Amino acid sequence: MIYFMFATGIENSCPTVSGRRVDEMEKCRHYDQWRRDFDLVEECEIRYLRYGPPIYRTWLGPDRYDWDFADETFAELRRRDIVPITDLCHFGVPDWIGDYQNPDFPALFADYARAFAERFPWIQLYTPINEMYICALFSAKYGWWNEQLKTDRAFVTALKHIVKANVLAMGRILEVRPDAIFIQSESSEYNHAQNPAAIRPAETLNAVRFLSLDLNYGHRVNSTMYEYLLDNGLTRDEYHFFLAGRLKHHCVMGNDYYSTNEHLVHPDGTTEASGEIFGYAVITNQYYARYRLPIMHTETNLMEGPGKNEAVRWLRKEWANVLRVRNDGLPIVGFTWYSLVDQVDWDTALREDNGRANPLGLYDLDRKPRAVAEVYRQLITEWREVLPTQSVVLGLPIRPPSEHDDTATRQLVAGARSRERRYQKAPSNDQS
C-alpha cells in the first residue's frame, strides 16, 4: 500500500508547429542521456517518474510499432524498481494521424494503449493523454500547435476526440491490467474578473476549464456549457457516451499548477496572466469539490532566477499548499516537480525554435544539480516516513515493478478483475 508518491518527470512533448516537429526529448538530449537521467532520479531518491516513449517514433501506423527505445528504457526502469507513471500522448500525434480533428484518432489511440499494456504488463500507473484541456486549447483555439486552428468548433472537436481517446484507452488498458490506476494530469485553472463588466466572461471561462474532466469523468455540465458544446459540434449521442463512462473509480485527479495558471479576464473576454492569486490549495479544493477523487499535484516548477533561490522558494510554497490540502482532509496522494532536467523553448510555448534552455529542472542540461534538486531530495527524505503515519485519507494499492510477478500481485490483479466485472453489472446511481 502506497500512501504518498514523490515524483518527477521526463517530458515527451512532441507537437507540430507549422509542420515542424518539436521533440522535447531530443531538445533535452534524453535520447543520448537516458541512463544518466535515470541515475539522477535515483540520486534525488525519487521512486516515481512521469515518463513515456515518444509517440510519433513508436506508433508507426495501425497495429505497427517500433518498441526498440521503449523496450530498452522501460526495462531499465524496471531493473531499478522505479515506478513509471506512463505518459502515452503528450501534446502530439504521429504524422499519419494528422491532428486532433481526425475522428479516427480515439479508436486508433485505444489500440495503441492496449498494445503498450500488453508489451509492458508490469506497468500499473498511466496518464493516457496529458493535459487534455491544454492540448485542445493550444491546438485548436489559440492556433499554436498541431492543427493550428482558432475557433470554438475546432476546440470542441479536438476536446471531444482527445477525451474520448483517453476514455477508450483506459478501458483497453484495464483489459490487460485490471488494477491499473489512471492519473489524469490536467491543468488547474482559474479566471479572475478584472471588473464587474468582466464577471460574465470570467464565469464562462471558469466553466470551460472543467470541460475535459467533466467529459472524462461523466460529470454533467451546466446548461451554458451544454449549449456551447452542442452549438460547436458535440452531438447528443457523443455527450451521452461520456455520461455513460464508468471508469472514474480507477482514477486519480492530477492537478498541475504553475504561476501562469490564473488569468485576469477583461470585459471583452480576452485574458492576461494574473500571477498567483488563489494558489494551488484554493483551486484544488474547487476541483475536488466537483469530482471527489483522490488528488495528486502532478506538475509544477519555476525558473531559477538571478537569485538562484526562486525555484527553491516556489517548491517550499507548493509543498506548503500540498500539506494545506492534506490537512483539510482531502485525499492527496502525491507531488511532482516537473521536470527532471531543464526544458527547452517553453518560454515561447514551444512555438519558436530558439534552442533556449529554460532553467526549470532539478538538473540543468549538463545534468548538474540546481539548488532545488537538493532541497527536493531533503524534503523527500524528511517527509516520506512521516506522511504514512499521519495519513487520514487513503493509500493506493500500487505494486512496484519488482513485485509484478509475485503471488500478492497476481491475487491483487485477480481481485481487481472480479470487482470490475461486478461493478460493470451493477446499475449506475451516479447522477453527478
Image (tube, rainbow, N blue to C red):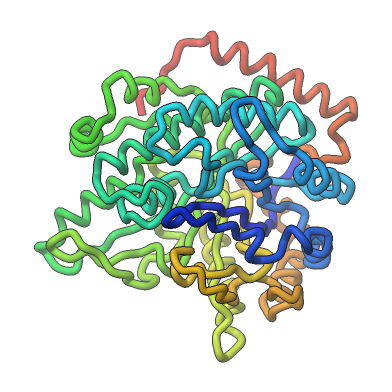
Give the residue at the far bottom of this rendering.
307
Does residue 133 appear left or right of residue 125 in this picture?
left
The residue positioned 64% from the left and 39% from the top of the image is: 126
Relative to 245, say whether 369 is above or below. below
Residue 179 position, x and y percent, is: 69, 28
User: Quarter holding the C terminus?
Assistant: top left
Image side of residue 75 versus residue 254, left or right: right
**Relative to the observer, which residue lies in front, 120 or 394?**
120
Residue 153 image offset from top left, x and y in percent? 25, 39
Residue shown at 38%/46% (left/top)? 147
> Image quadrant of residue 368?
bottom right
Rendered location of residue 296, percent (x, y): 57, 50
User: What residue sits 84% from the left and 43% below the top?
Assistant: 75
In the rendered view, tell whether residue 324 sits above or below residue 243. Answer: below
Q: Nearer the viewer, residue 105 or 229?
A: 105
Q: Is residue 208 left or right of residue 124?
A: left
Whether residue 215 is visible: no
